[in-house]
Amino acid sequence: MTQVSEAARHRDARARRSAGRRRRVIAVVFALPALLLLGALVVYPVLFSIGRSFFDASGSRFVGPDNYVAMFQDPATLRAVRNSTIWVIVAPTLLTGLGLILAVLVEKIRWAAAFKLLLFLPMAVSFLAAGIIFRLAYDADPDRGVLNAAVVSIHDAFREGSAFPDAQARTSGGVRATPDGGYETVDPLTPGDTVLPLGLVGIKPADVTAKARPAASAVTAGAAPGELRGVVYLDFSPGGGGRPGVVDATESGLPGLTVEVVQDGRVVAATTTGPDGLYRFKSLEKGQSYTVRLPADNFAAPFTGVSWLGPTLVTPAIIGAYLWIWAGFAMVLIGAGLSALPRDALEAARIDGANEWQVFRRITVPLLAPVLTVVFVTLVINVMKVFDLIYIIAPGPVQQDATVLATQMWLVSFGGGNDQGLGSALGVLLLLLVVPAMVFNIRRFRRSQS
């Protein structure tokens, strides 16, 4: 009886082992296509890039660690490392904080689902399309770039631009240019009997406002005692026939220009020209000498906005586009963690007298710390690989100012450098920087599952 039971146990053990082997074989068969794809698309390229990084640009000569040494001696690579560091520090931090704020606020509104949908929609837009959208939004021309259109509108609401930015004065006939871009009279002027016409050119007649009147009427009247009087006019007669430096009957005055009276380098009076270009200064001391000046503000170029894609702001501008795309992702993940928080702890804190800010800072954020960490690390991994937005948004002249490791790797390998040895070394560096974040995320995920 004992021998029979022993034999049965052996048969059962062999059957279990056989069934286990069959299950493993079946698992391998089903996983084999995925493993083959993983090897072909991930493992092989990684191993090939590591090997290629030890060869020269042509791939025919072994150079050892020379590519890694050259990589850290190249100013462009150091700039890419600096920009990548800015991305890693700024973008995930802002996105995590923004996602947390949005997730908390969404819980307080009535149409939470619709709001979440609107914020998550940019995730459905490809980086190519998003790059084109923001390239247009950041355009320097206010007539095309929506951001500069808004900035110019706000600026002009508080400070209007000059009326005639392209105007120039004829520097003959007693007028000279000042170092700051304005114009002033050469000879001293005395109140009471002076009428000084200041002719400007470089203005299209169509740009003269409808309020402008002929300047000839302002010249005919003489100056009153103690008065300094003159006219600023467009020294151009439509159809020709006018005389330079002389106010002709068909020439218009230029309204709205600032005129100053200067004595010993000090402005003693200021006024603006009327519809016929007339300016007058009363109550000036008789017998004193003055200089009339058109300050440079009259001819300052109009404010055209901010150079969003210039060397200084190109990286923050692209980070702004990245925030627009990924804010919904961070909000949804953090919102999921927020919905799983124990409500009794929040209500207990409110009953104990804590206000909403204290509940948020001392209870909500600590309880959400694991979720916030996962979101932050996931965004760090994603930021390290950012390529599309930088390549599309940054114009050619500032491409090097915005470059990160991913774009620098492409530029060195295929974008004109044609040095795939150095490009492979950059790829290996990028992999080494991404791997720790990936390992951290995987370990944290496993701990949360155990």
Image (cartoon, rainbow, N blue to C red):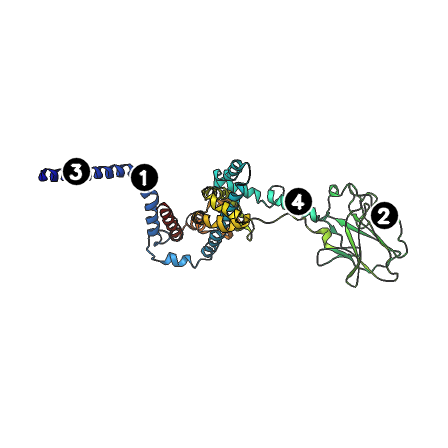
- In the picture as drawn, the residue positioned furthest to the front comes out as 352
Labelled pair 2, 1 in contact (Cβ < 8 Å): no
Q: Is residue 335 left or right of residue 24?
A: right
Labelled pair 1, 4 in contact (Cβ < 8 Å): no
The answer to whether residue 145 of the structure is visible from this angle is no
Real-space Cα separation, disc 2 to disc 1, in angstroms: 89 Å
According to the image, label 2 marks what residue? Answer: 218
| Mark 3 nearby-residue class (10 Å; few <14, some 14–19, many ≥20) | few
Which quadrant of the view contains residue 189? Answer: bottom right
According to the image, label 1 marks what residue? Answer: 34
According to the image, label 4 marks what residue? Answer: 153
On the rendered image, what quadrant is the N terminus found in? top left
Helix, strand or loop at disc 1?
Answer: helix
Helix, strand or loop at disc 4?
Answer: helix
The answer to whether residue 108 of the structure is visible from this angle is yes
| Mark 4 nearby-residue class (10 Å; few <14, some 14–19, many ≥20) | some
Real-space Cα separation, disc 3 to disc 2, in angstroms: 119 Å
Q: Which mark is residue 12?
A: 3
- Identify the mark nearer the N-term, 1 or 3: 3
Real-space Cα separation, disc 4 to disc 2, in angstroms: 35 Å
Real-space Cα separation, disc 1 to disc 3, in angstroms: 33 Å
Q: Position of residue 226 (x, y in %)?
A: 88, 57
Q: Amino acid at mark 1?
A: Ala
Q: Which callout, 4 or 2, points to the residue nearer the camera?
A: 4
Q: Amino acid at mark 4?
A: Ser
Helix, strand or loop at disc 3?
Answer: helix
